[in-house]
Amino acid sequence: MAGLAVNVDHVATLREARRVHYPEPVTAALLAELAGADGIVVHLREDRRHIHDRDVRILRQVVQTKFILEMASTSEMVGIALDIKPDLVTLVPEKTEELTTEGGLDLIVHKRVVSETVTLLRDSSIPVSIFIDPDPDQIKLAHQINADMVEIHTGSFCDATTAAKKEKTFSKITDAVKLSSKLKLGVNVGHGICYKTIKAFKGLKEINEFSIGHSIVSRAVLVGMEKAVREMAMLIKEL
Ligand code: PXP
């Protein structure tokens, strides 16, 4: 059965909307774990727009399931990861002007620098996943540079507005998941997945973990973190 990694960035987004001390992303992470999350994810961005260094440090100490750090492939972030030692690093592209991570990391363009980061992290026994678009060339490159896992970007499917676009984009995701698994890469998926779109993944048994943030935190505002996580975990169990 696939696992659920809960991204708590948007609890910090709410905190930073007022630059105060609440809501506390660490509390949200612990409630998510109590409700059955298999891992906690945060993205430490260069501009620290939501998650801060102190959140990462505390989460590393208190998360008991698996602590996953999303980060850009920069020397600053590599230094933090080597110090904190997350259970998994997911390398993502990052642009200051974007609202959220827009596309996968382009390994055709950034192969050399990403490859160096993968080597540095793996030499320190930190497994590495790379967030990529559902594109066979990107998957083959992730395999070539010795990534442990890939996270397939599901945004194009989740954001598709017509049945035809949904079908086309999901078929790319299916092919990407199967190719990654064939190459013995671990396979996570994420971005834009909500309580409705999760149901489309039924039967895709190669998926190791779903990485979900915005939809869970949005529901948690209304029904509470534990209920929001439990409902998503139940939907994943039914896949
Ligand atoms: N995976 C990656 C690599 C991401 O950058 C994000 C967004 O922070 C997610 C998963 C979660 O996406 P969402 O918040 O849309 O569920």
Image (cartoon, rainbow, N blue to C red):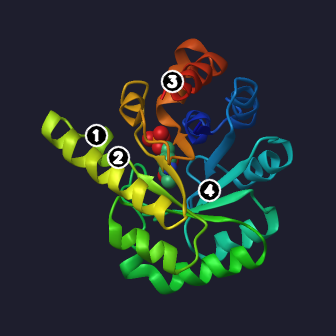
- Mark 2 in CB contact with mark 1 (< 8 angstroms): yes
Work out whether mark 1 precedes mark 4 in sequence or the reverse, and give the earlier one: 4
x, y percent for residue 153: 40, 53
Q: Nearer the viewer, residue 43 or 125?
A: 125
x, y percent for residue 194: 42, 30
Q: Residue at x 61, y 66 (%)?
A: 148
Residue underneath mark 1: 159
Work out whether mark 3 precedes mark 4 in sequence or the reverse, and give the earlier one: 4
Work out whether mark 3 precedes mark 2 in sequence or the reverse, and give the earlier one: 2
Residue type highlighted by circle 4: Leu
Q: Is residue 201 above or below residue 110?
A: above
Kind of element beneath mark 4: loop
Q: Residues within 10 Å of mark 4 (few under 14, many from 20)?
A: many
Residue type highlighted by circle 1: Asp
Residue type highlighted by circle 2: Gly
Distance, label 3 to label 1, CA atoms, is: 23 Å
Lateral position of residue 116 relative to residue 214, left or right = right
Q: Residue at x 43, y 67 (%)?
A: 105
x, y percent for residue 185: 54, 63
Residue underneath mark 3: 238
- Mark 3 in CB contact with mark 2 (< 8 angstroms): no
Distance, label 1 to label 4, CA atoms, is: 24 Å
Work out whether mark 3 precedes mark 1 in sequence or the reverse, and give the earlier one: 1
- Mark 3 in CB contact with mark 1 (< 8 angstroms): no
Residue underneath mark 4: 44
Picture disc at residue 155: 2
